[in-house]
Image (cartoon, rainbow, N blue to C red):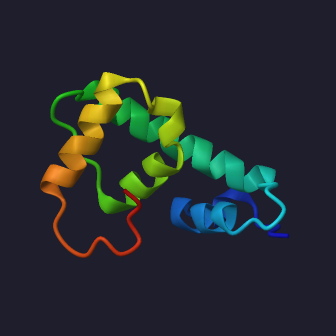
Amino acid sequence: MYTATTSQLTPAKALEIARNSEDGLVPPSVTAVLERAIGELWQRIQAQPTTYVMSKEEFVVFNYYRSRFANIPTAQQAVARFWNNFQGSSHGVDS
């Protein structure tokens, strides 16, 4: 079980821990980091709904929560903009 405080966790590390949780239970500190990251990202997307392009790091967090945004056109457009602007290896990026 991971016991770091939220100040020690990056969204990338929190995502790794959440995805590798064998029992399906994600520690509260990990959930807190991911919820903060997705909340801040969603605010940025809503502030620029037709122009904001997520970074690869933002996209992997967004993708983790994709079911939350499944029927929201702004979210679907943000994902499309990410893929339309993505350059580099797709290794580590879920589609």
Q: How many marks?
A: 0
For residue 41, side relative to residue 6 (left or right): left
The structure residue drawn at horizontal position 19% and vertical position 60%, both measured from the top left corner, is 86
For residue 88, side relative to residue 12 (left or right): left
The correct choice, above or below, for 10 with respect to 36 in the image is: below
Residue 57 in the image: state x and y as whole percent: 39, 61
The structure residue drawn at horizontal position 68% and vertical position 46%, both measured from the top left corner, is 32
For residue 86, side relative to residue 18 (left or right): left
The structure residue drawn at horizontal position 62% and vertical position 51%, both measured from the top left corner, is 33
Q: Quadrant of residue 36?
A: top right
Residue 62 in the image: state x and y as whole percent: 44, 46
Q: Quadrant of residue 47?
A: top left
Residue 75 in the image: state x and y as whole percent: 34, 32
The structure residue drawn at horizontal position 64% and vertical position 63%, both measured from the top left corner, is 19
Q: Nearer the viewer, residue 81 or 5?
A: 81
Q: Quadrant of the N terminus?
A: bottom right
Q: Quadrant of residue 7?
A: bottom right
Residue 20 in the image: state x and y as whole percent: 69, 69
The correct choice, above or below, for 28 with respect to 3 in the image is: above
For residue 30, side relative to residue 25 (left or right): left
Q: Nearer the viewer, residue 58 or 5?
A: 58
Q: Quadrant of the C terminus?
A: bottom left
The correct choice, above or below, for 82 with respect to 9 in the image is: above
